[in-house]
Amino acid sequence: MPKPAPSTQEEYRAMKKICTRTLTAAQAAAFEELTGLCRAHDKIRLSCPLDGDRFYLLSGEMPDGTGRPVLNSAIAVFEGDGLWECCGFTRPDARKRGYFNGLLEMLEQDAAQALPEPDLCFVADPNSGAAVNVLAAIGAELWYEEYAMEWNKGACKSLHSASLPLSPLRLTSVSGESESRLDFTAWLPGDQKAGSFSLYVQPPSACLFEVEIAEPFRGHGLGFAMVRQLQDLTPAIGISTLTLQVSGDNLPALRLYKKTGFHITETLSYYLY
């Protein structure tokens, strides 16, 4: 694994590397500043929710002599069964110094101690040459591609509900594992569970995920009805924008989201390491 260049080794040793499961307010602000700098420099939209399961942070001082602390590199990890999804960022003015590799080494050590040992999956925007080059250098291989999609209430044209062969759905919701999560269930008459989905809410937007229609009810337009009802509920939830991610191979889901007014904002590439 690449090490910091000789001219930066002393600076690198003076930096602070930590792993934490909870970000302080200052750390969260520094992480948002870091991702914002990377998005602007690389002309990408890739961001990272701050509800990860663990964060690897490498901080130091601004190179302008002010002594102001700065977050140079960070990796956010979302732990799944047998797979840890990772998002990594390094300040544009701190790249090619081995900082990301130092955090990756910490991440590898922690993953090796987990049971079962998970695969590591890195998310990248294929338009970011820097990210693609780093992933190639560490030996990560492209796994699959996914689309990020977005729906905006104000910009969306009027949609008319399709004629459904089954009775209209009824949505109920409960708070999820965190204050920002809402879990919805869609019911048919007779308390038949027809489907479900979840939202990660950060007003004025929310991320839609875990969308599912029960197998006996698929192919009847219930997915369309469920998403449309969610869109009608957005003012009550205090949001005006819905985002989601969908696999490029999932053509039925892509058709559903396009039909309900979502549009593709970026393509995400997933690399196995």
Image: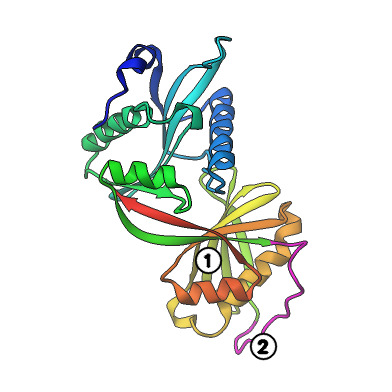
Mark 2, mark 1: which one is toward the viewer? 2
Q: Is residue 42 above or below residue 229?
A: above
**Majority secondary structure of magenta residues:** loop
In depth, the one of 246 and 59 nearer the eye is 59
Amino acid type, label 1: Ser
Q: Is residue 160 left or right of residue 26?
A: right
**Residue density around tag 2, few if under 14, some if 14–19, many if 20 or more, within 10 Å:** few
Q: Position of residue 254 (x, y in %)?
A: 52, 72
Q: Is residue 197 above or below residue 109?
A: below
Based on the displayed image, in which of its 4 quarters is residue 234 positioned?
bottom right
Identify the disc placed on residue 163.
2
* Boundaries of the magenta span: 152-167
Q: Position of residue 125 (x, y in %)?
A: 47, 51
Q: Residue at label 1?
A: 196
Q: Is residue 244 left or right of residue 137?
A: right
What secondary structure is found at the residue carrying circle 1?
Answer: strand
Q: Is residue 150 left or right of residue 270?
A: right
What secondary structure is found at the residue carrying circle 2?
Answer: loop
Identify the disc placed on residue 63.
none
In depth, the one of 171 and 65 nearer the eye is 65
For the point 66% across and 51% down, the residue is 205
Q: Position of residue 197 (x, y in %)?
A: 54, 62
Amino acid type, label 2: Ser
> Rounded to the nearest whole Å, what is the CA distance between mark 2 and mark 1?
21 Å
Quadrant position of the N terminus in the picture: top left
Total number of numbered discs in the rendering: 2
For the point 58% across and 25% down, the residue is 25
For the point 28% across and 30% down, the residue is 105
